[in-house]
Amino acid sequence: MSDKTENKGKYKIYSGNIPFERDNHLQMVDYCAYKDEFYRWKENHRFLDDIVYENYLRGRSSVTFVFRSLTRPKTKYFMCFTDFHDAIPYMTNGNISGEFVYCKRGSSYGIRLTFDQTEDFFSGRIES
């Protein structure tokens, strides 16, 4: 499998596709345990949202934080520990508002703040 990341400063941008629940185009999947036909794959993109911390999940070798969208309450996002650590200074009462991008760490998918990645990132594609 080829590496689908490119270096942009401190962060690597994942340029591969992101898995979503087949029946819900807004609900991403944090870990793909099944074959591809169980998921709807969507191209990575930047997006603006206001999210609130809900919970955390423990895996065999990972900790994932669960956020809920305040603009689309049925939409949940997952954030890996490292990305959560970087986002803490931007949190206010458990909320983070900003520009996010999907990412992949090992076998897990999640989101992270874009920070300094606003210039020419994915040709300026932003979805809401």
Image: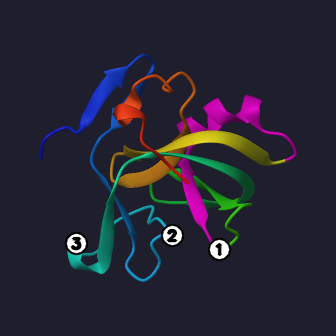
Spatial separation of the CA atoms under disc 3 and disc 2: 16 Å
Where residue 111 sits: x, y (%)?
51, 47
Residue 33, percent from left and from top: 32, 71
Question: Which mark lies nearer to you, 1 or 3?
Answer: 1
Outermost residue toward the left in this view:
1
Q: Quadrant of the C terminus?
A: bottom right
Residue plotted at (32% across, 71% down): 40
Q: Amino acid at mark 2?
A: Gln
Quarter of the view holding residue 115? top right
In the image, which residues are magenta? 75-93
Q: Could you say which disc has been placed on residue 36 in the image? A: 3
Q: Does the image show residue 33?
A: no
Place of residue 37 in the rendered image (x, y in percent of width and height, measured from the top left): 22, 78
CB within 8 Å, label 2 to label 1: yes
Mark 2: secondary structure: loop
Residue depicted at x 65% and y 74%: 74
